[in-house]
Amino acid sequence: MNITVCIGSSCHLKGSRAVVERLERLILEQGLKDEIELRGAFCMGQCQTGVSVLLDGTYYSLSPEETERFMIQTVLPRLAQAREASKTQIEPV
């Protein structure tokens, strides 16, 4: 799973550094370093919103205060779905 956080100037002013730091901490605390790749990107073209975060092709707007809720309510359920989908795939013989 890929999470990309905008670190462009507008998102930086809205707290992107704090969002990245909180996501890094949550990923480590949950033991998900091997399953989630956290990336940074300059302007993602969503400057009118909060800190732009791209999760597997879907944009979200976060503030640093919303980061933990985003992880619990959005990232972890998607990760569980991805794990379940990978279990049900048939292996070639």
Image (spheres, rainbow, N blue to C red):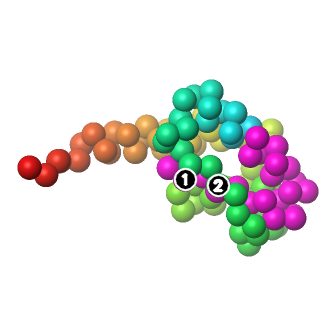
Q: Where is 87 relative to 14, above or below? A: above
Residue 66 visible in this rendered orientation of the protein: no
- Taking the spot 76% from the left edge, 69% from the top edge, the residue there is 43
In the picture of the structure, the residue carrying the numbered disc 2 is: 39
Residue that sits furthest to the top in the current view: 29
Q: Which mark is residue 2?
A: 1
The answer to whether residue 66 is left or right of residue 60 is right
Q: State the image coordinates of residue 10 (x, y, percent, origin top left).
A: 87, 64
Q: Determine the secondary structure under disc 1.
A: strand
Q: Determine the secondary structure under disc 2.
A: strand
**Front-most of residues 78 and 5:** 5
The magenta region covers 1-21
Label 1 sits on what residue type? Asn
Q: Are marks 1 and 2 in contact (CB under 8 Å)?
A: yes
**Front-most of residues 13 and 34:** 34
The answer to whether residue 13 is left or right of residue 26 is right
Was residue 2 drawn as part of the magenta stretch in this picture?
A: yes
Q: State the image coordinates of residue 38 (x, y, percent, origin top left).
A: 62, 49
